[in-house]
Amino acid sequence: MLQKLLERNPWRMANAMRRDPAPIPVVVCVDVEPDTRHVARDGRPPWRGYAATVELLDEWRSRLEAATGRPVRWAWFLRMDPSIADGYGTPAWAVAHAPARAERLTLAGDALGLHVHCVRWGADESEWIVDHGDPDWVAHCLDVGFAAYRDALGRACTLLRIGDRFLDEATLEVVARLGVRIDLTMEPGLPPHPLGNLNDRRTGVFPDFRAYPRVPYRPSRTDLRVPASPEHDGTWLLPVTTGAVTDTEALPAPPLHAASIGAGMPAYERLGLWHSPEVFRRIVQQVLAENRRAPYLVAVMRASHTVTGARDTIAANLEFLRTHPLVSRFAFTTPEAALEAATAPAGDGPESSSS
Ligand SMILES: [Zn+2]
């Protein structure tokens, strides 16, 4: 309802802008991995999507800097895990095959995190198995990824996105031990099964994120859904922005537990840059209409989307943000900066004084 009002009444947006000039962090996460869903075990096919996405986002960096009047930073999540080692001879192929690119993105101020898929080659089955049912394998994949990142980039990795949005309490222990400051795996409101037509062989359960907070928090060790006490110093979860994609689902008020919308399967989706402009716009407008104290957006994409038919759609969605009435408040930034803004004490935000 409010979303429709905002869409119909641009002056309301302008009004909101005058009343509250606080920046709205926008984090664009790119998963840098092979162009195909599964890693080719021979032939080392090039990661065309990585090169193409860097080129595309370079163009948009200057356009969005002009529109926002602020520096634009992207967040790249480099895939490093045993399956990459299997296909490319090293888990750090993302850096090893294009070291100058990783260096250039770092120099541009972008964030470089790690993207890990916990897949195992099934020799008997002759196919990749998504092996989330084996906590030792999950821990091994993370260990391999973090060691590869440190060796390739000469610094410890502090940002993580796990493939297939997998996260559970045992995995969080590993993630915290590895020194992750911010994990961006969680997609609140999404159902416990893969979206789209993924029908991989898999073990374990698909996380049920329907009852998860939609704001950043440090989870309790015993229940990922529950924010820990304030003195807890573990890993932060910075949830990917999600929204309802049907008319019937209303979004809950803060603290935004998706479960509070009641029974049934909420038709939530991620803020995916490959989504149709209608879906992308809808989710952005929902979040901005929620009247959060410290709104932020975390959008996601796979580098391969740029070379598998979604390039024009991604550009259309970025253009929507560039021409948005609130563009002067958008700050395309790193997960660290977004987390800092989203968790600043209430007194720091201009909204604390609003009635
Ligand atoms: Zn992935």
Image: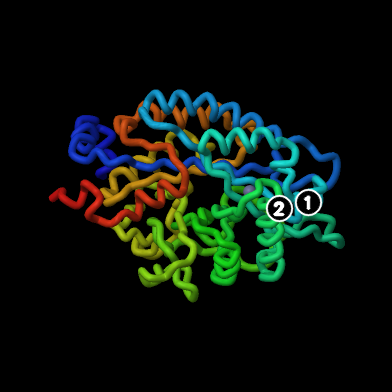
Q: Position of residue 118 (x, y in %)?
A: 68, 59
Residue at 81% across, 60% down? 122
Estimate how packed mark 2 is, as few (under 14), some (14 to 19) or many (20 or more) residues with alpha carbons within 10 Å.
many
Of residue 281 and residue 173, the one placed in the foreground of this image is 173
Residue named by callout 1: 85
Residue 281 located left or right of residue 161: left
Between disc 1 and disc 2, the foreground one is: 2
First of labels 1, 2 by sequence position: 1
Residue at 25% across, 32% down? 8
* SS at mark 1 in the image: helix
Residue 273 located left or right of residue 348: right
Q: CA distance from mark 1 to mark 2?
A: 10 Å
Q: Do labels 1 and 2 touch, CB within 8 Å? A: yes
- Inspect this view and state whether residue 5 appears: no
Residue named by callout 2: 148
Give residue 214's quadrant in the image.
bottom left
Give residue 177's quadrant in the image.
bottom right
Residue at 67% across, 65% down? 138
Estimate how packed mark 1 is, as few (under 14), some (14 to 19) or many (20 or more) residues with alpha carbons within 10 Å.
some
Q: Amino acid at mark 2?
A: Ala
Residue at 34% across, 58% down? 256
Of residue 137 and residue 152, the one placed in the foreground of this image is 152
